[in-house]
Amino acid sequence: MSNKWVKITTTVVGVLVIGTGAFLFGQTGANTVIGEERYNYDELSVLKGELEEKIDKYEQRNERLIERRQNLHRDLRDINTDIENAQNDMSELLEMQDNKEQIEKDYDSMQSDLEDLSKDLSKTEELLAKTQGDLKKAEKEPITLSAGTYIVGTDIDPGRYLSSPIGRSGNFSSHDTNDRLTSLLR
């Protein structure tokens, strides 16, 4: 029996020694080296939590930067659209400027034409006044024509005439050089 007790005791002591050694080895061997620093499990858990917080902050910052980048791209597109619209407006303004210059030239030409027409009108008015004066003179000296055909320049002097029938009735007509009727009085 004593041999049996020795074996049991030796086995129990061996298990205790091995268990204690394993525990102590696990306790001291549970350290991890990162760089030149040695960390145990609890320290690594704290470090992991800190790193996860930093990663979350960087991810949030990255999302804000991506959103800002998208906004800047949208703003850039808007600015490019504004620039394109401004260039189109500038082209239209330049075309309008060219048209303005042509209109000013046309206006100056028309103004010159108007001045010429005004001079012609003045001359025509003077001629009309003279002709009316001649007509008034003719009223003082009436011409009597009997029935027939008369040619201006041959039978009658060129000019303006006021015609009226002698007596109560009569017809008077005039024709142009192509023998078209220009007036008829009854």
Image (tube, helix red, strand yellow):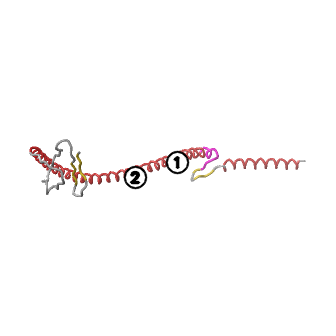
Q: Main secondary structure of the magenta part?
A: helix
Residue at far right of view: 1
First reached walking from the N terminus: tag 1 or tag 2: 1
Q: Residue furthest top?
A: 168
State yes or no: residue 129 in magenta: no
**Residue 64, relative to residue 176: is it above or below?**
above
Residue 168, position as x, y percentages in the image: 19, 41
Q: Which sits in the foreground, 87 or 1?
A: 87
Q: Amino acid at mark 1?
A: Asn
Q: Is the residue marked by circle 2 packed among few (<14), some (14-19), or many (20+) residues within 10 Å?
A: few
Is 104 displayed left or right of 133 in the figure? Answer: right
Secondary structure beneath disc 2? helix
* Quadrant of the image occupied by residue 149: bottom left
> Could you tell me residue 46's position as x and y percent?
60, 44
Secondary structure under the numbered disc 1 in the rendered image: helix
Q: Is residue 49 left or right of residue 3?
A: left
* Badge 1 density bin: few <14, some 14–19, many ≥20, Cα 10 Å: few
Horizontal and vertical percent position of residue 66: 51, 48
Please name whichever residue, 152 or 22, is drawn nearer the observer in this view of the structure. 152
Where does the image place residue 182, in percent across and percent down from the top left?
24, 51
Q: Nearer the viewer, residue 98 or 15?
A: 98
Residue that carries the numbered disc 2 in the rendered image: 84
Asked if the residue under mark 2 is in contact with the one under mark 1, i.e. CB atoms within 8 Å, the reply is no
Magenta segment includes 43: yes
Mark seen at residue 62: 1
Residue drawn at x 22%, y 50% is: 173
The segment highlighted magenta reads: 38-46
| C-alpha separation, residue under disc 1 versus residue under disc 2 | 33 Å
